[in-house]
Amino acid sequence: MCGIVGYTGIQNAAPVLLEGLRKLEYRGYDSAGMAVVQDGRIAVSKVTGRIAGLVEKTEDGRLLPGTTGVGHTRWATHGAPTEPNAHPHTSNDGRFAVVHNGIIENYMELREELTRKGYHFESETDTEVVVHLVEMYYKGNLKQAVMRTSARLQGSYALGIVCADEPGKIFAVREASPLILGIGIGENYFASDVTALVAYTRNAIYLEDGEFAELTPDGIQVYDCAGRPIQKKISRITWDIQAAEKGGYDHFMLKEIMEQPRAVKATMAPRIKGSDIVLDDVDIDLKQINKIVITACGSAYYAGCAAKYAIEKLCRIPVLTELASELRYSDPLIDGHTLLIVLSQSGETADTIAAMRECKSRGAKTLAVVNVVGSTIAKTADWCLYTWAGPEIAVATTKGYTTQLTVLYLFALYAARKLETIDDAAYRKLLTSLKALPKLLQQALDMNPNITQLAKKYHCAYSMFFIGRNTDYAVALEGALKMKEISYIHAESYAAGELKHGTIALIHEGQPVIALCCNDSITEKTMSNIVEVKARGAEVLAVAFKDNQKIVSLADDMIFIPKVNTLFSAAVEIVPLQILAYHVAKENGCDIDKPKNLAKSVTVE
Ligand code: AGP
């Protein structure tokens, strides 16, 4: 849950590392540090807080001269975000420095062993055992020391290791944590993701679990876990530099909200050929599938909850949605007739990976819907459909969610046609509705200039309720999550029909209730719930289609969306709720792109 970066070459390393860390800061931002090899020693600088503090402390890197180094931005797991706990960690003799993303699960026993052998620990982290092991095993050959160290570690780790005695050299190790090597001319790099590399190179090598690499200015050699050299494919990075910049917006979140029409189009258009939906290399024998299980965490899970309705309705196959953190420990009823759909923007979420592996071991066929190319989930699944959303930097996902929905809608329609559960006319009609999504998303962005005003009205709320039924309920789940994670306002989502089974006791004078009413078949029912909460003093902000005059007369405030087929409405309906959460958070002076206590990618259980 951290970002790591490394550079060896001809320039001073520190400015390159700082630039890379800025791009990786979304992965964790409670402390940061760099280690640079200079004149036969290792110089380290660390700060608590953001990368900006490290930039200041090192005077833009000038105080750390040297052409080889590693950097880290942290999301604390073991030990508070203090300077001693910040990475890089150094060996007792000061000859080695290590940065780490992941968790060393057996660190307690290693720490006891190393303490008994006389190694002194300066931090509370799990990572520090790594650097002491490297020191212990170093007999003049860093590669051997790295291999012996890796063999002792259990858990997930991407490591960057430098040694004062082998200047110009970095070892990068990967086990169940992302690590990408960047190939330059006379300089080479590694990083936790491509956003940190794209300003320098478009040629990358994706390390696999168990592999490690030796980087020098002149080249990169990748080894398997036994230390045998292996040839790796060089991949082209397609994301451009602008995609990883704010491009004039105040926040990445706003930029990414605005990018949604384009991202949805990029995800959908290449997969629609005439009247056919072509899903990359997916060749699932759908007739053998009797159950679909969708698993994911957070917003990705809520995308699954929303798409479940479309898949069930069109394919007539039962769809269960399961939180990955629950599924993995639930002794799931999964077999070779189950299709497991795994959703993940990052492709690195630890619980999602574990749930997928558990289900695979029980015979499930696995289809991943992932944004980050080459990520663990993408590689582990039997089939992968990428969401071509481009890099998502804001911790709160927006285009990640809508592009996941897009892929699932495509899948629903594709599968229904294969299974012959809809006729040709219905298929064509739905395909037309689906193709309209980018345009409808753009309208949803444009048609509510009043949201900034609504944010001024609602930003002081102590809590909010999001209610809806069916697909509207699924959107309520995501709407409430957006609100709480960036504005820090308590927000609860409820199936509207459940209110009177307990929760309505919490409704009082002035209590904001966001009522989602975009599912025609059931809007009348939700309107009754609006009447009920209004009778108890609630302030109702309704989200509805433009032509729904009845709701206008009931609600205190309105947000409109364009008319969209109910099966696909979640993708459009969420847009104004993202914007509302954004402006409420802005009113409250919150750090929108980097909310407190969070990180973009949750690579620990
Ligand atoms: C959403 O805004 C969150 N940041 C979070 O819930 C996220 O969706 C979840 O952690 C899953 O991440 P993934 O899509 O990368 O697996």
Image (spheres, grey):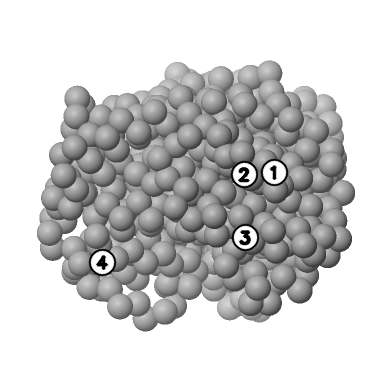
Closer to us: 162 or 296: 296
Mark 2 highlights which residue? 550
Ligand 1 within 8 angstroms of badge 2 C-beta: no
Give me the residue at 19% from left, 25% from top.
274
Q: Which residue is mark 1?
A: 553
- Does residue 581 appear in this view? no
Label 4 crowd (10 A; few <14 / some 14-19 / many >=20): some
Q: Can you tell which quarter of the image residue 37 is in?
A: top right
94 vs 588: above or below: below
Alpha-carbon distance for marks 3 and 2?
Answer: 11 Å
On screen, residue 306 versus residue 135, left or right, reads left
Percent from the top left, x then y, of residue 536?
Answer: 79, 64
Residue on which the image places disc 4 = 291
Image location (x, y in percent) of residue 482: 65, 49
Q: Which mark is residue 528?
A: 3
Q: Is residue 335 above or below residue 527?
A: below
